[in-house]
Image: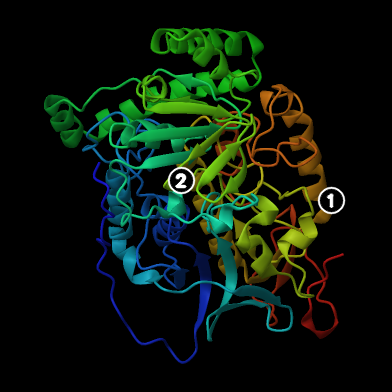
Amino acid sequence: MTSEAPPSAVAHPTSARPASDHHRVVIIGAGFSGLTAGLALLRREVHDFVILERTDDVGGVWRDNTYPGVGVDTPSPLYQLRRLTNPDWSDLYAPGHEVLDYSRTLARTDGLLSHVRFHSDVDQARWDPDARRWRIRTGDAEVTADVLVSAAGLVSDPAMPDVPGLAGFPGPAFHSSRWDHDVDLDGKRVAVIGTGASAIQIVPAIQPRVRELHVLQRTPAWVMPKPERPGAERLRRALDASPRLRRLQFDILYAGAEVLASARRSKLLREGLMRVGRRHLAEQVPDEDLRARLTPDFEYLCKRPLISNSYLPAMGEPNTTLHTGGLSEVRGSTVVAGDGTEAEVDVIVLNTGFQIGITSPIARRITDAAGASLSDHWGDRPRAYLGMSYPGFPNFFLTQGPNATSGASSTLLFAEAQGRYIADAVVMMAREGIEVTDVRPEVERRWTRRIRRRSARTVYERGGCASYYQNDDGVNVVMWPANSAEYQLRTRRFRLAPFRALHGRNGAGRPLGPALPAPRGGELAVG
């Protein structure tokens, strides 16, 4: 992996914006979730949609994250769409540029790229009850839609820490997802803040190049052995020639991932996995004191588990120093750790996570008819029926929403399920002459209670850690608490019964579920 940022590889068409910029569906974001939703619409012969992308390329996090060593921590053959598999992964865990290339391939499938509108950052999306449509503002332009889909991503906007003195640091300081490729790290003193999924890839990639590497760890993570198997040419040829073999490979990896993911509720399995983690740590870190500081005091899966064969050895190199307690202060060029240790550095790399749930910009920009945002409604507890629909936000669907993604298997399994469900909803609404659907409040409440009960029995809430999965009360508001097969089953088709429906003003179509009487002025009641 080179340290140079890859150029945009998608040649996108330019066209004049139509005078009436209304679409059946508007999708926010051209990452994997947005592209998957678009492909699902095309498969159902829905062509009147546009994907609004704020940058000049597709790919989402794989476009944004170009740091040294970037790659997937899910097996590559599992990190793909079942219908559109890639036989050419160079490794079982592919480097980031290959994943980005795969997303660009998806964008060129079935003419999907012609539906993407680049440089279109959404400032606000508001439901118009009189027109029964969404009004989406991008800069000085407005797009309207019957159905709005937010595919803005779970980890698309970095969280910058509020640390005293950080703003006054005289050298380069940047987030790992906004890597500054103009900064030469060779021979520099570098501080890496945080030890999450990005840091364990960055640390071994830059450690041989820098003079001093200071890693400021808030809490250690479970680091597991990484199965590394460079793609054999013979196997790659066989996969290329046989879609059936690719499906078999996918199914085998999927089954293995689900078995490991079942540790969220199995203490016995977690204890076995923790033994593997401790053995891996003991084999790679001979120094007893360093090993103790790298040993987690919480259960496996409570936080996202990490995989690496190179991170732990890099932590034991003579030019690497581990500081604990996180970053507490910056004094000029000096970083101060929570344990009181200090180091003078030239560059700071922040691996401080992302804005999740109510803190994400998109949750503050999507508003109901009264102007209240999703963040306003959610408070500290993001929630949605199936992770996709929230009362008072008609004709609106989230992807990778509350409790509707996986920290152990592939997020694309959820993206595919959500894309199919949304496309099915759009087709049903058109077929039955339904203008507006709004999930019933009591349905969302029952769903959320069920999810909360199930989450409370998982390691996400009982594992003895604080993670980005949780809100301030320790409640899991991010991860799906069961196996992904159940989620795929629950979302296999759109059902109208959980929703209140408002049919077209001309009475087209026939109702398939309980209908919502049209209130005065055409406004959809959201009681």
Disc 1 residue crowd, few under 14, some 14–19, many 20+, Cα 10 Å: few
**Tag 2: residue type?**
Val
Q: Is residue 201 visible?
A: no
Q: Is residue 341 left or right of residue 41?
A: right
Residue 348 numbered tag: none
Q: In this view, does 208 lie to the left or right of 288?
A: left
**Residue toward you, 323 or 496:** 323
Give how far across and how far down residue 62 sits, in percent: 38, 50
Residue 442 numbered tag: 1
Give how far across and how far down residue 91 sits, in percent: 25, 30
Q: In this view, does 205 lie above or below 130?
A: above
Disc 2 residue crowd, few under 14, some 14–19, many 20+, Cα 10 Å: many
Residue plotted at (17% across, 31% down): 236
Q: Is residue 140 left or right of residue 447?
A: left
Q: Is residue 460 left or right of residue 55?
A: right
Give how far across and how far down residue 345 sits, in percent: 45, 43
Q: Can residue 462 be seen in this view?
A: yes
**Residue 50 falls in image quadrant:** bottom left
Tell me the element at label 1: helix
Residue plotted at (50% across, 16% down): 290
**Tag 1: residue type?**
Glu
Tell me the element at label 2: strand
Looking at the rendered image, the quarter that the N terminus falls into is top left
Residue identified by numbered label 2:
349
Residue plotted at (58% across, 48% down): 331
Q: In this view, does 282 lie above or below 234?
A: above
**Residue toward you, 214 or 244:** 214
Looking at the rendered image, the quarter that the C terminus falls into is bottom right
**Residue 99 falls in image quadrant:** top left
